[in-house]
């Protein structure tokens, strides 16, 4: 299951309506930090499973 361009556009519009244009850069920054942390955690988990 993947997100298409249309679905991504709808999600971005909803975020813009909920948070407003002023807070959008902060929200995106926090989101990217969260995704980066999630990916690192998944990588660490995968590495631990490979060591066993």
Image (cartoon, helix red, strand yellow):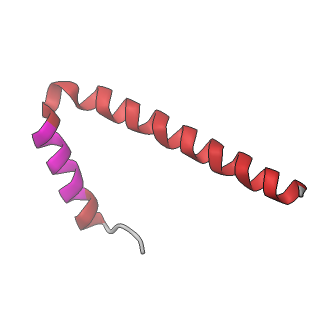
Q: Residue at the spot x=49%, y=43% of the render?
A: 35
Quadrant housing the N terminus = bottom left
Q: Is residue 22 above or below residue 36?
A: above
Looking at the image, residue 3 sits to the left or right of residue 21; the answer is right
Q: Residue at the spot x=48%, y=33% of the render?
A: 33
Q: How far across and down, in percent of the image, does residue 28 sit?
A: 34, 35
Is residue 13 highlighted in magenta?
A: yes
**Residue, far right:** 52
Looking at the image, residue 38 sits to the left or right of residue 32; the answer is right
Q: How far across and down, in percent of the image, does residue 18 sit?
A: 13, 40
Our reading of the magenta stretch's main secondary structure is helix
Q: Residue at the spot x=89%, y=54% of the render?
A: 51
Quadrant housing the C terminus = bottom right
In-front residue for pair 24/5: 24
**Residue, far front:** 52
Q: How far across and down, in percent of the image, does residue 17 sit?
A: 10, 42
Q: How far across and down, in percent of the image, does residue 44 sit?
A: 73, 46
Identify the image quadrant of residue 46: bottom right
Query: Magenta segment, which residues?
Result: 9-18
Q: Is residue 44 above or below residue 22?
A: below
**Residue, far bottom:** 1
In-front residue for pair 37/6: 37
């Amino acid at each position: 299951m993947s997100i298409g361009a249309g679905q991504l556009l709808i999600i971005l519009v909803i975020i813009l309506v909920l948070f407003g244009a002023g807070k959008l850069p902060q929200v995106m920054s926090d989101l990217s930090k969260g995704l980066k942390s999630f990916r690192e955690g998944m990588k660490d988990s995968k590495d631990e499973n490979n060591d066993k």
